[in-house]
């Protein structure tokens, strides 16, 4: 029998490793034997009674991966290149779907979407359809037990290849959880949202003052990010969650983008500093070989969405059929395509493990002499292989965004003809093109037979295309030490998550993220025992802060009483109304695209007729659909966030009040009524959670308030600490706020700051006020 070449390489290398080999790692085996060679222990992963190179932890990770790939069947290799949701069943065990993914599809990468909570779920409530993909909530003990069970099942397989679990962000205050975006913290420690972390970083780098001074060379202090990674890494590792779909290195340059709330900032330099610190904190220091993963790493990151998903046309998101295009229109050389690459360059320099290309299609892009083809990024060899790996030197694996094979294969839609086959593009075509382009793992795709058949037909080469991808993926698992010990101490997980000292760090970060925009006549901080009327805020939080409270949140709102010292209003904005969207519906999906919208139908080259026209459920209504939604339409429900596409421009508060898919809570009319009732708007405090850079337009009257506060995902407790002076405002805006509608409409989507319109900025990047006089509070 042919012995793997890597065996000879490994044996010849052993004398050289004598002085450089790592120390004995912990070996944890539940079904496979452990080999004892002198004082050293190794897991006999294939149970053949001998030490094979891939089992030898003294060898470099890539050498072990190169050996292992030669031992794998094509089905095992194909399974390695897939990742899909694998949640526990309600009781914490492996579901029927999970067993199929492991045993039949031969998969070892999984998305773990179920939320971790303090109490076990009610299993009498059965989840069905789309809700099932979000999974049953699990206690820390259950979730750790589940990941251990999966690892044990995989260890018992032919080669004992362990699992790598990934998920989206978990450690943030999330007021509007969304599937596939962020499910919320649950039992995990809550820090502010991404923009809040950036606001705190800027404030720590240059303390605010009562004049709103912005230093000429504003730089952030990354100490808070390092604290954050320490907490996050400990909590994720406690349940066996060793990979992340994040963080987003996308720049918030298009204010209308539905995923703006997941971005940190509009500034590429600040974003680069944050991304570099996240990679260093969660993966570890970069080594001479350009990698930073090791068994000591908490979490292997998948930085997204290459080459920068911020500049979306009209802010429409490419999860949707009407939002496919990424535009780079700034006429100067300062911004554009290269500006959005900066944070990714930093991630690559830090040895980031994985990078995710976005769904979006680059329109009319030429960069450094290369004209980029207009396909989704995961299908572009120019993007993945030539740019990412070639020019930028990325050494890790490329993980597609979810659903590019069956749902969101933009540029390779089924209404286009594949010149290779002469037939409409189908999932097999997209699989072949993605892998040939350099994409290593296909997200939310779970049919290994597709890859097997492509190799069998000669459209993919096992040695040319499959083996290099599998080596890159295996290398990640070897680097993390999962082959030696993939298990966690499930009994210790509850004590590791949500520790009191970690929650205090998270709360402190929330306080530090709060930005004071306006404070007329020293309205803030409030005096002890002040009589306040609250709307939007939890009245109990106000009372706990030592205030005398009248609750204005009742169904029949009580008017502001005489003698009130201040009205305190917390404003949150959502797109709950957009859930009514249906691509098939005559009123919404069938609505004509107006002449003010530059939406071109690729099939005709003309303006798209209706908003739902490119949804497969409309143009292929007679065929089975692969969408997550109940009606089988990709866009129905706009489940990944955002307004109705024709209301994307309605960022002004007074426009939202007239919109169908924007909801302000409290409503603008209620806010204005309370401002009239107190008799003096100078005694009104308005706090707004800026999930997007909303326009505080004159007609809304919000600017007349005595104090304005910007938040980015914080608790009421953190806000009242600042309002009462127990803590002082320390944050700075991580993105500019537009002054008017024209600033948003004329903004180049790839450029920050609204410089296109004179007077287009209400509050600039880096702005923030402090309290007058001596520093108060924390």
Image (cartoon, rainbow, N blue to C red):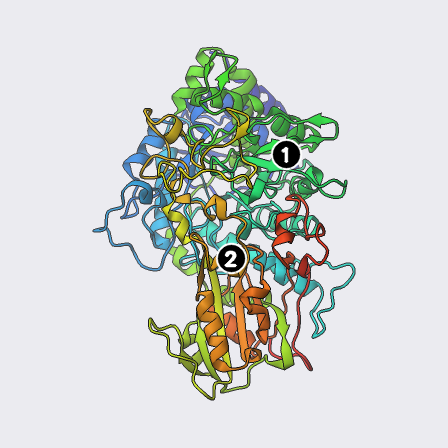
Give the residue at x 60% y 78%. 777
Q: CA distance from mark 1 to mark 2?
A: 70 Å
Q: Earlier in the sequence, mark 1 or mark 2?
A: 1
Which residue does the numbered mark 1 point to in the structure image?
A: 18
Question: x and y percent of residue 89 in the render?
Answer: 29, 44
Residue 65 in view (yes/no): no
Question: x and y percent of residue 412 in the render?
Answer: 50, 24
Question: x and y percent of residue 726 in the render?
Answer: 56, 78
Question: x and y percent of residue 227 in the render?
Answer: 58, 59
- The one of 320 and 287 positioned closer to us in this rendering: 320
Position above or below: 348 against 255: above
Residue 662 in view (yes/no): yes
Q: Nearer the viewer, mark 1 or mark 2?
A: 2
Position above or below: 306 against 235: above
Task: Give the quarter of the image for residue 15.
Answer: top right
The crowding category of the residue bearing disc 1, from other C-alpha atoms within 10 Å (few below 14, some 14 to 19, many at least 20), is few
Give the residue at x 40% y 53%. 576
Which residue does the numbered mark 2 point to in the structure image?
A: 655
| Residue farthest left in this picture | 124
Find out whether the residues at labels 1 and 2 contact each other: C-beta distance under 8 Å: no
The disc at residue 416 is none
Q: Secondary structure at mark 1?
A: loop
Position above or below: 526 against 68: below
Quarter of the picture containing the C terminus is bottom right
The crowding category of the residue bearing disc 2, from other C-alpha atoms within 10 Å (few below 14, some 14 to 19, many at least 20), is some
């Amino acid at each position: 029998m042919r012995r793997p070449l890597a065996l000879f390489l490994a044996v010849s290398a052993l004398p050289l490793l004598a002085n450089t080999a790592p120390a004995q790692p912990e070996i944890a085996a539940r079904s496979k034997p452990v080999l004892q060679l002198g004082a050293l222990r190794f897991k006999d992963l294939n149970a053949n009674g001998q030490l094979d190179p891939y089992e030898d932890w003294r060898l470099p990770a890539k050498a072990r991966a190169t050996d292992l790939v030669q031992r794998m069947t094509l089905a095992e290799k194909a399974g390695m290149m897939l990742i899909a949701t694998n949640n526990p069943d309600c009781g914490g065990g492996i579901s029927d779907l999970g067993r199929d993914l492991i045993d039949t599809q031969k998969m070892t990468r999984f998305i773990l979407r179920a939320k971790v909570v303090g109490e076990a779920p009610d299993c009498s409530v059965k989840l069905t359809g789309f809700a099932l993909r979000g999974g049953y909530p699990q206690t820390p003990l259950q979730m750790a037990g589940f990941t251990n069970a999966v690892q044990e099942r995989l260890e018992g397989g032919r080669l004992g290849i362990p699992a790598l679990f990934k998920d989206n962000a978990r450690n943030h205050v999330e007021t509007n959880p969304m599937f596939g975006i962020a499910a919320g913290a649950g039992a995990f420690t809550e820090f502010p949202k991404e923009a809040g972390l950036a606001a705190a970083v800027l404030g720590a780098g240059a303390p605010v003052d009562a004049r709103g001074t912005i230093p000429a060379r504003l730089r952030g202090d990354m100490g808070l990010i390092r604290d954050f990674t320490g907490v996050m890494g400990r909590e994720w590792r406690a349940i066996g969650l060793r990979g992340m779909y994040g963080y987003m290195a996308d720049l918030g340059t298009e204010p209308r983008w539905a995923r703006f709330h997941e971005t940190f900032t509009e500034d590429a330099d600040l974003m680069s500093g944050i991304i570099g610190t996240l990679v260093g904190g969660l993966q570890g220091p970069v080594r001479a070989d350009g990698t930073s993963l090791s068994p000591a790493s908490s979490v292997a990151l998948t930085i997204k969405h290459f080459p920068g998903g911020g500049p979306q046309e009209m802010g429409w998101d490419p999860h949707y059929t009407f939002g496919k295009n990424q535009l780079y229109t700034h006429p100067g050389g300062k911004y554009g395509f290269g500006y959005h690459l900066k944070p990714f360059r930093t991630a690559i320099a830090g040895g980031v493990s994985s990078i995710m290309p976005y769904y979006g299609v680059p329109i009319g892009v030429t960069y450094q002499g290369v004209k980029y083809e207009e396909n989704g990024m995961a299908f572009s060899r120019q993007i993945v292989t030539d740019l990412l790996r070639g020019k930028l030197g990325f050494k890790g694996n490329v993980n597609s965004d979810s659903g590019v094979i069956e749902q969101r294969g933009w540029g390779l839609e089924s209404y286009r003809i594949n010149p290779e086959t002469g037939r409409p593009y189908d999932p097999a075509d997209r699989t072949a093109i993605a892998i040939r382009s350099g994409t290593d793992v296909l997200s939310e795709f779970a049919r290994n037979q597709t890859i097997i058949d492509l190799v069998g037909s000669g459209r993919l080469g096992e040695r040319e295309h499959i083996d290099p991808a599998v080596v890159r993926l295996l290398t990640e698992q070897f680097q993390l030490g999962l082959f030696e010990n993939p298990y966690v101490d499930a009994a210790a997980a509850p004590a590791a998550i949500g520790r009191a000292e970690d929650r205090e760090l998270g709360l402190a970060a929330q306080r530090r993220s709060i930005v004071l925009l306006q404070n007329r006549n020293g309205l803030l901080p409030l005096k002890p025992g002040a009589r306040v009327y609250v709307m939007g805020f939890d009245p109990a939080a106000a009372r706990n802060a030592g205030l005398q409270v009248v609750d204005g949140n009742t169904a029949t709102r009580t008017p502001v009483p005489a003698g009130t010292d201040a009205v305190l209003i917390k404003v949150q904005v959502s797109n709950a109304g957009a859930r009514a969207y249906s691509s098939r519906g005559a009123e919404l999906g069938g609505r004509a695209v107006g002449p003010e919208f530059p939406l071109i139908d690729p099939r005709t080259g003309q303006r798209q007729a209706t908003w739902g026209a490119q949804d497969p459920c409309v143009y292929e209504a007679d065929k089975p659909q692969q969408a997550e939604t109940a009606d089988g339409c990709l866009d129905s429900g706009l489940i990944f966030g955002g307004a109705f596409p024709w209301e994307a421009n309605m960022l002004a508060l007074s426009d939202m009040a007239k919109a169908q898919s924007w909801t302000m809570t409290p409503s603008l009319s209620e806010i204005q009524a309370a401002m009239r009732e107190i008799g003096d708007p100078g005694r009104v405090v308005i706090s707004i959670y800026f999930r997007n850079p909303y326009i505080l337009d004159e007609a809304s009257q919000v600017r007349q308030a005595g104090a304005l506060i910007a938040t980015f995902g914080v608790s009421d407790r953190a806000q009242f600490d600042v309002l009462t002076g127990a803590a002082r405002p320390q944050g700075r805006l991580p993105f500019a706020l537009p002054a008017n509608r024209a600033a948003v409409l004329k903004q180049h989507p790839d450029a920050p700051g609204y410089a296109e319109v004179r007077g287009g900025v209400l509050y600039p990047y880096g702005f923030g006020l402090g309290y007058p006089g001596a520093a108060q509070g924390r």
